Image (cartoon, rainbow, N blue to C red):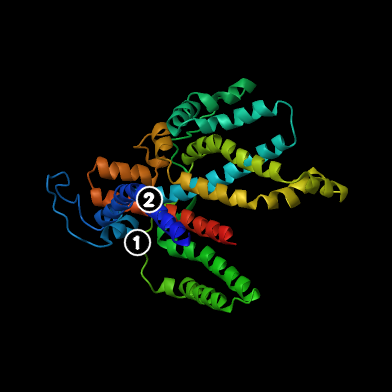
């Protein structure tokens, strides 16, 4: 009997392997194989000469393309695009989380016509970025849409250039980029050092402490010795033209975060709310001190998903502002132009790999965290 069960299990395992094997092979070829090809292409000089030749000549140049993107004279647009991406991510996250949570709290209080309002808030999410970009392109036009709102109150028309402004704020010198990045990173590692020491995790605490000291050494001493990454000053910052893209993104995905938060709030037990009321907590205190802390896992999931979306704004920017609009640039747009217009395939592949790494920085920690939660 035991031998029969063992043979049945072995046969089931083999059957399962043969069933999923075609999918594994296809994923390996068309996903990981192409990722590997893109990484290899980024390490060559394909496109420097005769990029569209039938048998193009490629030479391995290592990290030369990456060095050019971050320190080369002709790639200042890419560096501004990276800066735009950081602001896109920060404002998209802050705006959608805050607005989505606010809407979820309003609906959680059992307002009248809740189903109608929930449908209205969720509707933008059902649209593609192309449709959203087309709608908001009209809304943000200099001679119509939002700029005409003041005229309804007898005021002059606004002349703000929502998607073509050249004004920048929060500017910084690209030469100081390592210092700008290392200061918050040093504060984070310092926090992790004390946190691990307090939890008696001495090995981790020592490692984070060493990293903190190395970062402090660079900030205080080495940055004055090591040559800057650029031989000239190059200013970058938040271009006000990106505000239109950010507004459109928040409009589309605030309903999504609202749905996540509403599900989390509705999942909290009613006894928790009743206990808070008996303790004298008002509505604000209940949501601020009890409800919101209990939906932290939802916030983490929303942050990971929205951060990933902020790296894929190609279609929204393309439809709303156009591919050639430098003011609203994004590495994905630059990658498209570099690869398929300029035929600089290696440089375009380098931009694709950078976007891939940025996405992995959000996805991999989330997967590790989720795996640990399932394990325990």
Instruction: Looking at the image, tell me whether mark 1 or mark 2 is earlier in sequence order.
Output: 2
Task: For label 2, count other residues whose C-alpha is less than 10 Å away and answer few (under 14), some (14-19) or many (20+).
Answer: few
Which of 290 and 99 lies nearest the eye of the viewer?
Answer: 290
Under circle 1, the secondary element is: loop
- The correct choice, above or below, for 197 with respect to 352 in the image is below
* Residue 208 in view in this figure: yes
- Which residue occupies the extreme front position in the image? 1
Vertically, is 188 above or below 280?
Answer: below
Q: Secondary structure at mark 2?
A: helix
Q: Which residue is mark 1?
A: 230
**Residue of label 2:** 15
- The residue sitting at 23% across, 43% down in the picture is 342
> What separation in Å lies between label 1 and label 2 (alpha carbons)?
58 Å
Q: Residue at x 24, y 48 (%)?
A: 345
Q: Is residue 355 visible?
A: no
Is 163 displayed left or right of 156 in the figure? left
Residue 89 position in % (x across, y down): 50, 48
Whole-percent x and y of residue 181?
48, 62
Quarter in which the C terminus is drawn: bottom right
The mark lying in front, picked from 1 and 2, is 2
x then y, percent, for residue 45: 20, 55
């Amino acid at each position: 009997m035991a031998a029969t069960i063992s043979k049945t299990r072995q046969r089931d395992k083999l059957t399962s392997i043969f069933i999923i094997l075609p999918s594994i092979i296809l994923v390996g070829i068309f996903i990981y194989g192409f990722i590997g090809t893109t990484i290899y292409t980024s390490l060559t000089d394909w496109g420097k000469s005769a990029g569209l030749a039938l048998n193009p000549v490629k030479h391995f140049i290592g990290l030369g393309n990456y060095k050019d993107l971050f320190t080369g004279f002709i790639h200042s647009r890419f560096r501004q695009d990276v800066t735009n991406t950081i602001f896109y991510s920060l404002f998209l996250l802050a705006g959608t989380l805050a607005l989505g949570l606010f809407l979820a709290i309003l609906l959680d209080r059992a307002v009248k016509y809740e189903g109608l309002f929930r449908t209205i808030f969720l509707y933008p999410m059902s649209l593609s970025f192309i449709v959203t970009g087309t709608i908001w392109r009209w809304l943000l036009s200099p001679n119509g849409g939002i700029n005409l709102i003041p005229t309804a109150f007898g005021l002059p028309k606004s002349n703000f250039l929502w998607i073509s402004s050249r004004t920048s704020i929060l500017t910084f010198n690209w030469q100081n980029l390592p210092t700008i990045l290392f200061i918050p990173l040093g504060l984070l590692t310092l926090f992790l050092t004390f946190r691990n020491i307090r939890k008696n995790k001495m090995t981790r605490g020592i490692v984070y402490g060493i990293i903190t000291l190395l970062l402090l050494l660079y900030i205080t001493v080495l940055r004055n010795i090591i040559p800057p990454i650029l031989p000239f000053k190059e200013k970058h910052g938040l271009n006000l033209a990106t505000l239109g893209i950010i507004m459109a993104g928040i409009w589309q995905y605030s309903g999504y975060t609202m749905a996540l938060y509403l599900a989390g709030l509705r999942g909290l037990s009613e006894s928790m709310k009743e206990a808070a009321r008996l303790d004298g907590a008002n509505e604000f205190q209940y949501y601020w001190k009890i409800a919101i802390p209990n939906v932290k896992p939802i916030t983490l999931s929303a942050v990971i998903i929205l951060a990933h979306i902020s790296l894929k704004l190609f279609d929204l920017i393309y439809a709303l502002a156009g591919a050639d609009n430098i003011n609203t640039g994004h590495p994905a747009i630059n990658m498209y132009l570099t690869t398929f217009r300029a035929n600089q395939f290696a440089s375009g592949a380098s931009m694709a790999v950078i976007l891939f790494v940025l996405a992995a920085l959000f996805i991999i920690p989330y997967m590790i965290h989720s795996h640990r939660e399932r394990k325990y």
